[in-house]
Amino acid sequence: MDKKIPSHELIQPNLMPCKVARLNFAGGYGADNAHRHNCYQIFLFKKGGGEHMIDFNYYPIEDNSLHFVSEGQVHAFNSTEETDGYVILFTKEIVILNSANKFIFNDFPVFNKNAAPVLSLDKVMYSLIENVILMMMQEYAKQNVYKENILGSYISILLMQTKTVITETAAYKSADNTSQELLQRFNGLVEENFVKYHKVNTYADLLNVTPNHLSEIIKKVTGKTAGDIIHERLILEAKRRLLHSSISAKELAFELNFNDPSYFSRFFKAKTGLSPEAFRNEIREKYKH
């Protein structure tokens, strides 16, 4: 029987669509099972230690840093007992319903994949973000008829504050608004169609631009080619399915719309350095799946 990546239903229907708490890594948090959540998460680390795996990318947990995990992403911690901070869990709806910017998720670089999911903060910004979270914790403990509205507004403020940091980075400032918009549309189409379409030309047609223009803009904004982004999404999906199932490489190739299983295996190894089966064994051993 296939295993599935554990999905923790931390936000329950008809209950408060937000939680905020102090992180508890007492005794360390050794390589827990890779899992996903039915909500978004923001981690503010006061004291670093260890690493955080987000969709098979590994980020050191550093002092004064923010980590963002989107709904459905696979993640796991390998931390130390000194690791300290806070976590906010929330649904998209609580933010949109209580934000002046109804397109805040479309505009937020981390959630539309225009920026990395980890952000280092200076002392001033760390203090500002921590104060917002502390106010959220106080509100969360109350029985207030407007509690949900207030918490949603606080998350909106937090996102907008962190967006000011992200958009000041050299990588983000190097791209104009038109380029950022094209990247956002391209990412959306890839997310919807990566199994069906593997070619840059197809996405260029859907975006009504030439393949060369698409590749040039994507390279300018991200440092990656359009083909790289398509391939990364295919590899991510392959990794997710290898982690939680006993599917063979041949079956996986057909599920991801590769006509030649041997080509898929070569493609996977070229991108990861491992065969599909070797990757499955390594990731399950590391995260005890």
Image: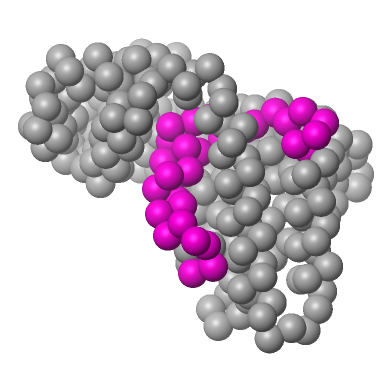
Which residue appears at 61% of the width and 27% of the height?
A: 58
Residue drawn 18% across and 30% down?
Answer: 198
Q: Is residue 58 above or below residue 287?
A: above
131 lies left or right of 106: right
Query: Residue 62, relative to residue 36: is it above or below?
Result: above
Up-down relation of residue 201 to residue 244 (above or below): above
Residue at the location (75% across, 46% down)?
Answer: 129
Give x and y (percent) for residue 69. 57, 45
Dominant SS of magenta comes to loop
- Residue 109 is left or right of residue 64, and the answer is left
Which of the 4 image quadrants contains residue 264? top left
Say left or right for 218 vs 204. right
The quadrant in which the C terminus is found is top right
106 relative position to 218: left or right: right
**Residue 47: x and y, percent?**
86, 35
What colour scheme does the image use? one colour
State the residue in front, 132 or 204.
Answer: 132
On the image, which quarter does residue 52 sit in? top right
Q: Position of residue 157 (x, y in %)?
A: 63, 53
Visible in this render: residue 87?
yes
For the N terminus, which image quadrant? Answer: bottom left
Image: magenta residue range = 97-126
Res. 30 in view: no
**Residue in front for this viewpoint, 276 or 17:** 17
Toward the front, the furthest residue is: 100
Q: Give percent across and percent down for residue 267.
A: 29, 19
Q: Residue at x 74, y 83 (%)?
A: 144
Q: How many marks?
A: 0
Q: Nearer the viewer, residue 282 or 141?
A: 141
**Quick check: is 13 in the magenta stretch?**
no
Residue 52 sits above or below residue 95 on the image: above
